Image (spheres, rainbow, N blue to C red):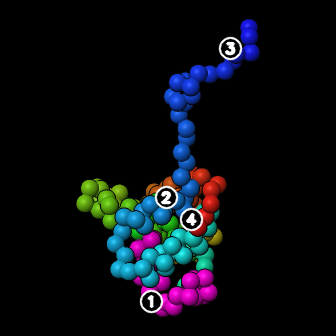
Amino acid sequence: LSAGSYSTSEEEEKTIPVAVENTFHEYLEEQLGLIELTDEKEEAIAHQIIGSIDEDGYLRREPIAIIDDLMFSQNLFVSEEEVEEVFKKIQDFDPPGTAARDLRECLLIQLENKIEQQEEELPQEELETLLLARDIIRDYFDEFSKKHFQKLIRQFDIDEDSLKDAMDVILKLNPKPASGYSTSGSRS
């Protein structure tokens, strides 16, 4: 065999598919282009928030830190209310749980999202299980995380099967919304 037989023709090279992996932040930036922001100030806040979301999909920075960043990097003065307003819009992004400040909020966002999307279609029993799961995370997260199951059973006046069903729902949620996305690439 000659050395030339190992090379590929130009035509073959063109047909080789190239995997295009979006980073989590690129995916959020794409979604940002689809929502209506009132002005350039809101857009700057949104970019700052997205840039502050960590590799798990959480926003672990306080609004005051985002306000400071915008003031120092862009000489832009914004209020905490303005940051919160944009923050709420970004929390509606896909995947559910994005920009949560902690695990409890991440799970709660996902549960609220499921309830809102499926409320009309679900059989009553499944809806009640979703609502119970939401109430456990919202009101008794410490007991849930410390596995105080008997306390939850007493608190909600439910049987073990109902608690198990709610736990199954909770355990299927994604604790890291950014998982499944490429982490490489530049963050702006």
Tell me where the magenta segment starts and ends, as one range.
65-91
Compared across the picture, whether 82 is left or right of 11 comes to: left
Instruction: For marks 3 and 2, give the CA distance.
Output: 42 Å
Hey, what amino acid is under mark 3? Ser
Please name the predominant secondary structure of the magenta segment in the image: helix
Q: Could you say which is closer to the camera, residue 164 or residue 28?
A: 28
| 159 over 5 or under it: above or below | below
Instruction: For marks 3 and 1, give the CA distance.
Output: 66 Å
Instruction: Give the structural element (helix, strand or loop) at label 1.
Output: helix
Residue 74 visible at all: yes
The residue located at (52%, 24%) in the rendering is 11
Task: Quickly name the residue at label 2.
Answer: 27
75 in magenta:
yes
Crowd band around label 3 with a 10 angstrom C-alpha radius: few (<14), some (14–19), many (20+): few
Instruction: For marks 1 and 2, give the CA distance.
Output: 25 Å
Image quadrant in which the N terminus is located: top right
Hey, what amino acid is under mark 1? Glu
Residue 57's disc number: 4
The percent position of residue 177, horizontal first and vertical second, equals 53, 60
Q: Residue furthest left?
A: 120
The percent position of residue 77, horizontal first and vertical second, equals 51, 91
Task: Quickly name the residue at label 3.
Answer: 5
Choose the circle earlier in sequence order: 3 or 2.
3
Task: Quickly name the residue at label 1.
Answer: 81
The residue located at (60%, 79%) in the rendering is 61
Q: Could you say which is closer to the camera, residue 54 or residue 133?
A: 54
Mark whose residue sits in front, 3 or 2: 3
Hey, what amino acid is under mark 4? Gly
Choose the circle earlier in sequence order: 2 or 4.
2
Instruction: Give the structural element (helix, strand or loop) at label 3.
Output: helix
